[in-house]
Image (tube, rainbow, N blue to C red):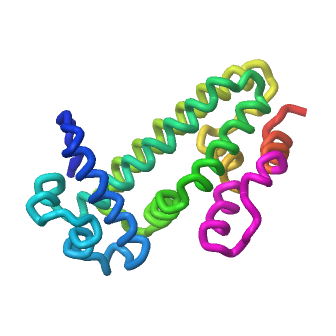
Amino acid sequence: MVFEKTIKRRPATEKRRREILDAALSCFLEKGFSGTTIEDIRTLSKASHGSIYHQFRSKDEIAFVLFIEGMQDYHQQVIKSLEFASTARGVLHSIIHSHIRITVEDPEVSRYLSQISMADDVGDIEERYEKLNDDFAKDIWLNLKPYVEKNEIRQLPLELYFSIIIGPGAHLCRSWLRKRIQKNPLDSVEELTEAAWNSLRVI
């Protein structure tokens, strides 16, 4: 099922849409998806029922849009950061730093993305989520490929690169989001970069 709309929105319409999405995000994080109602979202966003249903067809669509737009923004920010990387280690540092920076700067969206991506059943999100991740993995590979060809980074199956580079930082960020640790994850970027570099560099 495709929920996304490609129409060009007026500023006032986009503002209302954003208010609804922001309210839904707060409700989902506080009450969970199942515990949140359209009325909860309407009350918090101060939107009318008509306004909500003009923008979205259902609560499921709101959740879908929140997730997909959050993932797209995350991917775009990470890939953009790679424009400034000029070494193999620099690529790893940019990916890790971007992931952690995005988490720290936008913890609510990061919590939501983490919760949805780790759920057993993501319903209508699953197909689009897998495509986004596949496209992202290919973009990461294109930035690593020159260093693999120069024998600076080991040749591995495509899916392993993201796990090795992001996996430890993602775990650290989840612990921080759940308040299991207090230390700012950004303080660990250099150590995580060194660990990824030692795992991937050709010795």
Quadrant, the C terminus: top right
Q: Is residue 140 above or below residue 199?
A: above
Q: Is residue 71 above or below residue 6?
A: below
Task: Residue 129: give x, y in percent of width and height.
Answer: 40, 50
Quarter location, residue 151: top right
Q: Residue at x 79, y 50 (%)?
A: 192
Residue farthest along the right direction in this orientation: 203
Residue farthest along the left direction in this orientation: 50
Task: Residue 58: give x, y in percent of width and height.
Answer: 18, 63
Task: Residue 183: give x, y in percent of width and height.
Answer: 76, 65
Q: Residue at x 79, y 54 (%)?
A: 187
Magenta residue span: 169-191
Q: Is residue 125 above or below residue 85?
A: below
Report the predominant secondary structure element of the magenta stretch: helix
Q: Is residue 53 above or below residue 94?
A: below
Q: Residue at x 62, y 65 (%)?
A: 174
Position of residue 115 in the picture relative to residue 201 (left or right): left
Quarter location, residue 4: top left
Quarter location, residue 83: top right
Position of residue 11 in the picture relative to residue 185 (left or right): left
Please tell me which residue lies in front, 105 or 93: 105
